[in-house]
Structures are given as structure tokens and as C-alpha cells.
């Protein structure tokens, strides 16, 4: 797993050797400060190993997590913007629909009022016509009844007059008068067309 | 000859044989009846005689006036009426007189389908109908 560190270790060893070669005459100074190249190399190697491990197991996942978080946040913001846009559009459409519904309801209400008024007027007119018709029929029935009654009275009076006249004439006419009336009737028939 | 039309045609011929000078002759009627009795079948006799009686009555009514009157009727008045009816009918009209007190006074004459009413009852009935 740490094979990628091999070139670094080799390069570090080479660099240490070069430093030692370049400052071969200054070994006293290095010894004065207590610097041992072997420890320096070990620390460098340890540092590199630690750095590599941190990079591999801490920094890289953290970066990935942060990238993922950032991406999620961006997606969330983007989604929020889209939702806001959709919400605005929905509100706009809702407002439009409500306005159209109000207009439509107003139109329906107006039509309903007009229809109701027309129906009311029509029914009132029909009722008035029916009442007038009933009154006319009643007047006609009364008139007919009146005429019928008058006709019956006239018929009865005429019948009584004829009956009375017949009885009176039958009692009062003498044989001579009857003979004279028969002769007159014969002359009338003879002169008729 | 069972159809009504055939019977009417046959009776019309019998009627023409029964007439003499525009009047029904009794002797001819007897002869016609004898002929029918001898020649017609039993099923034909009844409808023929029924129709024959009807037309004979109608013909007699055309020449025989029924004169209804009230009280004594003078011969002059009767002759006057018969002369007028004969002139109208175009043949001699005889008369049958009947007393009818319901007429009250006056005279009513029936000849065929014609009625001449000059009675008081008739006048009163006319007045009553006009009132109605």
C-alpha cells in the first residue's frame, strides 16, 4: 500500500547523501547542533508517511465529503430556486385560474339571474294569461248560462201561453166559428203556392 | 233475386203494372198480387210484398189527401182545397177527412210528403217556435 512512497524515500536518501557530500567538511557543525542525517531522514520519512496517511484517510474523505456537501447544497439551492420559480408560476397560474373562475362565476351568475328573471317574467305572463283565460271562460260560461236560462224561461212562457190560449179557444169557439175558420183555412190553402 | 236492389227493381215493375191514369188501380193490384203468389218462391214473397205495400201506400198518399179539420166542413171548402191540390199534383186528388180537435180550429191537409197547415194549433206552435 505504501509502494508509492518508495520513490520519495529514495529521493530523500539521495538528497541527504548529496548534502553530506556537499558539506563533507562541515561535519563538525552538524555535530555541534546534534543533527544526525539518519534521524532527519527518518523524520522526513515519518512525516511523509503521516502526510500520506492523513491525505489518504482524512484529508481526501473530508474533501470528498465537503465536495458532496457543497454539491448537495448547490443542488438544494438550485432545487429551492426551481421550487421558488415553480411556486411563483403556480401562484401566478392559481391567481389566473382564480381570476378566470371569478369571471366565469360572475358570468354564470349573471346568466342565472337573467334566466331566472326571464323565467319569472314568463311564468308571470303565463299566469296572467291563464287568469285572463279563466276569467273569460267564466264570463262566457256565465253568459251561456244566462242565455240558456232566458231561453228556457222564454220557452216555458211560450208553452204556457200556447197551452192557455189553446184551452181558452177550445172552450170559447163555437161550432159556427170553427166552421167559418175551416172555410177560411181552406181558402188560405187553396191560395197558397 | 234476394238482394234488396233486385227486389226494388222488381217491385218498381209491379208498381208500374198497378197504375192506371197516374193512380193506383185496385183491380190491377189484385192481378199483380195473384201473379206474385203464383210465380214467386216462398222466400221471395215476404220481402216483395213488404216493399210492394210500401210503394203502393206511397203512391196512394200522393193522390189521396188526408184533410184534418175541426167542426163541420162545407163541401165547397173541401172541393176548393182538392182542386188546388189536383192542380199542384197534376192528377186528380181524392180526400179522406178526419175530425181532429187538437187543431182547435182551421184545417191541416197532408198529401204525400207535403203538409199544408192552416190550423190555430199550428199557428200557436209557430209562434212558440219563433219565441224560442
Image (spheres, coloured by chain):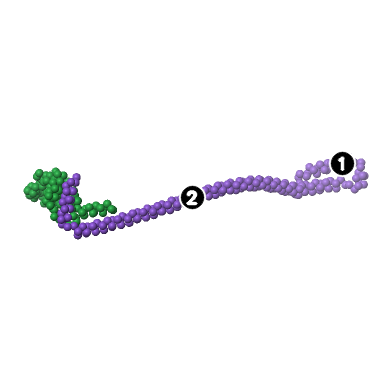
Q: How many marks are shown on the rendered structure?
A: 2
Chain for colour purple: A
Q: Is residue A144 left or right of residue B35?
A: right
Q: Is residue A63 visible?
A: yes
Chain to which the residue tagged by mark 1 belongs: A
Where does label 1 land, which residue? A19
Which chain is indicated by disc 2? A
Q: Quadrant of the C terminus of chain A?
A: top left
**Which residue is pictured at 49% across the width and 51% down the height?**
A120
The residue located at (7%, 48%) in the rendering is B27
Q: Nearer the viewer, residue A46 or A107?
A: A107
Q: Which mark is residue A121?
A: 2
Q: Which chain is green?
A: B
Q: Name the mark nearer the viewer: 1 or 2.
A: 2
Residue A141 in percent (x, y) is at 36, 54
- Mark 2 neighbour class, 10 Å CA radius: few under 14, some 14 to 19, many 20 or more: few
N-term-proximal mark, 1 vs 2: 1
Residue B25 place in picture, x, y as percent: 9, 47
**Which sits in the foreground, A97 or A40?**
A97
| Nearest the eye: A32 or A25 | A32
Q: Check disc 2 and report its element: helix, strand or loop.
A: helix
Residue at 81%, 47% (x, y): give it: A47
Indicate the position of residue B60 as horizontal and vertical percent values: 13, 49
* Place of residue B112 in the rendered image (x, y in percent of width and height, measured from the top left): 16, 48
Amino acid at each position: 500500500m505504501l509502494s508509492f512512497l518508495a520513490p520519495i524515500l529514495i529521493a530523500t536518501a539521495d538528497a541527504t547523501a548529496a548534502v553530506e557530500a556537499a558539506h563533507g567538511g562541515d561535519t563538525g557543525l552538524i555535530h555541534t547542533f546534534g543533527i544526525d542525517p539518519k534521524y532527519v531522514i527518518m523524520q522526513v520519512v515519518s512525516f511523509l508517511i503521516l502526510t500520506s496517511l492523513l491525505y489518504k484517510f482524512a484529508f481526501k474523505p473530508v474533501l470528498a465529503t465537503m465536495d458532496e456537501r457543497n454539491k448537495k447544497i448547490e443542488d438544494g439551492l438550485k432545487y429551492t430556486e426551481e421550487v421558488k420559480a415553480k411556486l411563483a408560476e403556480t401562484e401566478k397560474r392559481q391567481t389566473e385560474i382564480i381570476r378566470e373562475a371569478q369571471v366565469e362565476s360572475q358570468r354564470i351568475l349573471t346568466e342565472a339571474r337573467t334566466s331566472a328573471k326571464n323565467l319569472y317574467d314568463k311564468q308571470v305572463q303565463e299566469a296572467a294569461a291563464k287568469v285572463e283565460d279563466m276569467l273569460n271562460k267564466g264570463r262566457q260560461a256565465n253568459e251561456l248560462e244566462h242565455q240558456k236560462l232566458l231561453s228556457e224561461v222564454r220557452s216555458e212562457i211560450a208553452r204556457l201561453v200556447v197551452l192557455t190560449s189553446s184551452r181558452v179557444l177550445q172552450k170559447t169557439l163555437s161550432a159556427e166559428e170553427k166552421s167559418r175558420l175551416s172555410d177560411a183555412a181552406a181558402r188560405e190553402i187553396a191560395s197558397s203556392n | 233475386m234476394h238482394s234488396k236492389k233486385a227486389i226494388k227493381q222488381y217491385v218498381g215493375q209491379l208498381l208500374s203494372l198497378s197504375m192506371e191514369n197516374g193512380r193506383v188501380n185496385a183491380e190491377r193490384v189484385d192481378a199483380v198480387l195473384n201473379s206474385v203468389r203464383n210465380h214467386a218462391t216462398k222466400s221471395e214473397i215476404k220481402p216483395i210484398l213488404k216493399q210492394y205495400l210500401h210503394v203502393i201506400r206511397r203512391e196512394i198518399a200522393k193522390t189521396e189527401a188526408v184533410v184534418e179539420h175541426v167542426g163541420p166542413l162545407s163541401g165547397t171548402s173541401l172541393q176548393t182545397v182538392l182542386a188546388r191540390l189536383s192542380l199542384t199534383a197534376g192528377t186528380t186528388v181524392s180526400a179522406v177527412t178526419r175530425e181532429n180537435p187538437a187543431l182547435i180550429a182551421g184545417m191541416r191537409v197532408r198529401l204525400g210528403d207535403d203538409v199544408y197547415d192552416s190550423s190555430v194549433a199550428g199557428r200557436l206552435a209557430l209562434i212558440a217556435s219563433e219565441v224560442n
